[in-house]
């Protein structure tokens, strides 16, 4: 995974630079999300690595599947990636691009995993507290994992806050062993 990130990062930075220069950040987000979804599809992924297809044919397959939803710059990116045998990087490029965009817009994506669904009041309070702590706007998504028993795990980039009962019990068990 780290290798994919390392290879994808320059492409994402180049796309981000172009998007910033031409003020097309959101259009690129849409194009990259579509390309990443299509490239990640099992049937398409198999076609994209077929050695019998030329890089132009691989690019054409991807562009044809996306239809007229891609702009010319995105089509050029697909051609470049195909030429360099890097079409499989599209999901990673899209993820790195979104990170760069979030940094520019001073936002962070937060995933809250809880044992039960959060009420809207709880979610609002948590979003306000995270905004104050992280000093940026928060886009929150929720997941449910009943194995947590209670509490929640909050993930925001590299930051992980484990306030779950399961996490606390694990820490207690570790402390008792040592």
Image: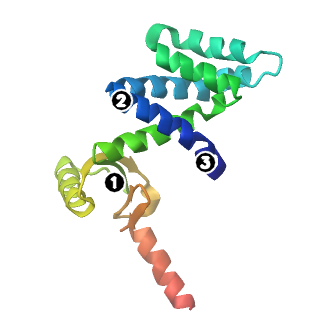
Q: Quadrant of the C terminus?
A: bottom right
Label 2 neighbour load within 10 Å: few <14, some 14-19, many 20+: few
Residue under label 3: 6
| Residue 3 x %, y % | 66, 49
Find out whether the residues at labels 2 and 3 contact each other: C-beta distance under 8 Å: no
* Viewer-closest of 116 and 140: 140
**Against 176, is 52 above or below?**
above
- Between tags 1 and 2, which lies in front? 2
Which residue is at 46% across, 28% downward? 33
Which disc is residue 29 wearing?
A: none
Among numbered discs 1 and 2, the one appearing first in the sequence: 2
**Color theme of the render:** rainbow
Helix, strand or loop status at disc 2: helix
Distance from disc 2 to disc 3, alpha carbons, whole Å, reads: 23 Å
Labelled pair 3, 1 in contact (Cβ < 8 Å): no
C-alpha gap between disc 3 and disc 1:
37 Å
Cα separation, mark 1 vs mark 2, equals: 44 Å
Which residue is tagged 2? 21
């Amino acid at each position: 995974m780290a290798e994919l990130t390392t290879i994808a990062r320059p492409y994402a930075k180049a796309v981000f630079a172009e998007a910033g220069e031409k003020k097309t950040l959101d259009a690129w987000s849409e194009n990259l999300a579509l390309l990443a979804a299509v490239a990640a599809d099992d049937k398409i992924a198999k076609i994209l690595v077929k050695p019998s297809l030329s890089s132009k044919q691989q690019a054409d397959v991807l562009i044809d599947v996306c239809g007229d939803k891609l702009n010319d710059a995105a089509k050029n990116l697909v051609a470049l990636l195909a030429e360099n045998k890097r079409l499989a990087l599209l999901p990673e490029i899209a993820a790195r691009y979104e990170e760069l965009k979030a940094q520019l817009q001073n936002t962070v994506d937060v995933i809250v995993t809880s044992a039960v669904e959060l009420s809207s009041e709880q979610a609002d309070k948590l979003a306000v507290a995270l905004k104050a702590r992280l000093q940026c706007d928060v886009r929150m998504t929720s997941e449910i994992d009943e194995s947590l028993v209670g509490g929640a795990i909050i993930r925001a980039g590299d930051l992980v806050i484990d306030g779950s009962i399961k996490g606390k019990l694990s820490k207690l068990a570790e402390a008792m062993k040592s």
